[in-house]
Amino acid sequence: MLIRTPPRHDPTASEITPRRVWQRRRELIRAAAAGLALPAAPGLALAQGPKAEPAKLPAKPGPFGTTDKPTPYKDVTTYNNFYEFGLDKDDPVKNAGRLKTRPWTVAVEGEVGKPGTFGIEELLKLAPMEERVYRMRCVEGWSMVIPWVGFPLSELIKRVEPTGNAKFVEFYTLNDPKQMPGVSSSVIAWPYVEGLRMDEANSPLTLLTFGLYGEVLPNQNGAPLRLVVPWKYGFKSGKSLVKIRFVEKQPVTSWNRSAPQEYGFYSNVNPNVDHPRWSQATERRIGEDGFIQRKRPTLMFNGYADQVASLYAGMDLKRFY
Ligand SMILES: Nc1nc2c(c(=O)[nH]1)N[C@H]1C(S)=C(S)[C@@H](COP(=O)(O)O)O[C@H]1N2
Ligand SMILES: [Mo]
């Protein structure tokens, strides 16, 4: 059992500590609280081994964190939806390794005073990185708790100076058949396009995300940058973004185009509005499945009602699903 005494000037754990040690520390704290003893973590030895750790991405703790237990790194990075790399949950981790994330640029265009192309290095320096431990809920009925690293999308929005005609924002994922084996199938229209209303995009919860667990995003999680919109179903959080476009009319998003009865523009997490083919009242927390699987109730706006319910005041959420 490896026990570490932090130096006296120790900043937040995620700033300086390799992910495995950091996660291990959290596990130990929880186990101690529950009166359990844990075996040594096999992952710790690997930290010095031949396979390099992903680059660190230091971050200060940010607001809106949930106290739910974070989903283990292994589940977060091996159970993914990223259809550009295949339809099965383990396809992204198997196939996304080939994605080249440098050089990388994001075009910002449309109804803005200062359109332009941002390099990834420039974006990384645009605002201070924060760690936000958010619940994520997939429309399929599973959820995770992920310590994301990023900053509010509003930081980028204010720099490009949207015009008065900018009512919505479109987000475009890379669409490269040479690197993405999944785009040869026509499950949805490529590129993957998602959209938000301007006030949703400017919500302090909406994150432009570059990392998780104190490290740069693994490719399968949407490297080098993605959106994270925690009160909406997971598919609204587009990965590997290459273009952000400000528009006047409500965008036609990829999922909305392929199955409009099932996936609306808003797609807010809502236990009272079922998917046409299944209930949305409960969810399964990945990493916590046991033999007797516990279903937990899905929360209105995924638990972020205090922050976002006012954005939808007066709207019929059964109609605007
Ligand atoms: N470009 C792109 N972004 C995407 C997807 C996708 O298939 N392609 N899947 C979405 C869905 S359905 C979910 S649930 C989340 C999953 O994010 P995660 O794998 O990091 O948990 O990514 C979303 N972003
Ligand atoms: Mo999803």
Image (cartoon, rainbow, N blue to C red):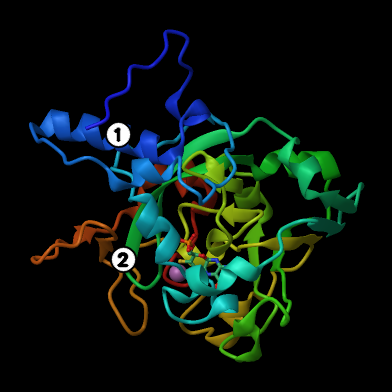
**Callout 1 secondary element:** helix
Q: In the rendered image, which residue does mark 1 sit on?
A: 26
Q: Amino acid at mark 2?
A: Asn
Q: On the image, numbered disc 2 is attached to which residue?
A: 272
**Dividing the image into 4 quarters, which one contains the N terminus?**
top left
Q: Decide: few, some or many residues near mark 1? Use Cα within 10 Å; few <14, some 14-19, many ≥20.
A: some
Residue depicted at 59% across the width and 43% down the height:
55
Viewer-proximal residue, 179 or 263? 179
Q: Is residue 79 visible?
A: yes
Q: Is mark 1 within 8 Å of ligand 1?
A: no
**Residue found 75% across the figure and 68% down from its top:** 249
Q: Nearer the viewer, residue 110 or 243?
A: 243
In the displayed orientation, state which residue is furthest to the top. 8
Q: Is residue 143 left or right of residue 236?
A: left
Q: Earlier in the sequence, mark 1 or mark 2?
A: 1
Q: Is residue 256 left or right of residue 112?
A: left
Q: Position of residue 186 (x, y in %)?
A: 61, 91
Report, in whole angstroms, how far the alpha carbon at label 1 lies from the one at label 2: 34 Å
Q: Nearer the viewer, mark 1 or mark 2?
A: 1
SS class, disc 2: loop
Indicate the position of residue 229 as horizontal and vertical percent values.
53, 53
Residue visible at 51% across and 35% down?
A: 131
